[in-house]
């Protein structure tokens, strides 16, 4: 007898483990107010390009057999490509699965 598949809305973020070559990132909240105090309309919302790493997949093995280690650890704050990654929405929070190569910088 086959197991029933879990609905994505019923998943807990701790149940997701990225495959080799990927990291799971929780994007930072969008800015609703400028530094000078002006409130931005909802239509201005732009996806943030930085966030916190929640989980890291294993080492990526290229077609040539080279092993690429994860460039980040769990808990790191990273900056990533604007159009990189894949969105996954769980309980009204949108997370990003990013390839190692989509990460541009680690915030120290």
Image (spheres, rainbow, N blue to C red):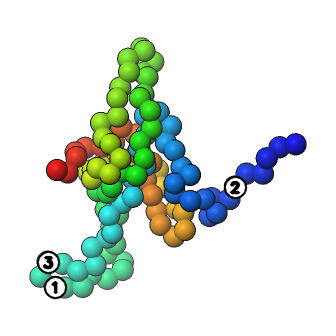
The image quarter in which residue 1 lies: top right
Q: From this viewpoint, which residue is outermost toward the bottom? A: 38
Determine whether, in the image, residue 54 is placed left or right of residue 34.
Answer: right
Looking at the rendered structure, the secondary structure element under dot 1 is loop
Q: Name the residue under label 3.
A: 35
Q: Residue drawn 42% across and 28% down? A: 60
Disc 1 and disc 2: Cα gap in Å?
A: 44 Å
| Residue 94 image offset from top left, x and y in percent | 46, 62
Which residue matches tag 1? 37
Q: Is mark 2 on a helix, strand or loop?
A: loop
Mark 1 or mark 2, whichever is nearer to me: 2
Left of 19 or right of it: where is 84? left
25 or 102, nearer to the observer: 25
Q: Is residue 82 visible?
A: no
Q: Mark 2 points at which residue?
A: 6
* Distance from the alpha carbon under mark 3 to that under mark 1: 5 Å
Residue 22 in view of the camera:
yes
> Which residue sits at x=56%, y=52%?
15
Report, in whole angstroms, how far the alpha carbon at label 2 lies from the one at label 3: 43 Å
Specify the farthest residue to the right: 1
């Amino acid at each position: 007898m086959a197991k029933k598949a879990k609905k994505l809305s019923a998943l807990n973020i701790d149940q997701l483990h990225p495959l080799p070559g990927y990291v799971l990132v929780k994007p930072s909240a969008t800015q609703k107010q400028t530094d000078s105090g002006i409130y931005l309309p909802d239509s201005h919302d732009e996806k943030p390009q930085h966030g916190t790493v929640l989980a890291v997949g294993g080492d990526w093995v290229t077609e040539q057999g080279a092993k690429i280690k994860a460039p980040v650890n769990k808990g790191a704050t990273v900056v990533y490509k604007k159009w990189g990654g894949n969105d996954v929405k769980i309980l009204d929070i949108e997370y990003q699965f990013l390839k190692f190569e989509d990460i541009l910088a680690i915030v120290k």
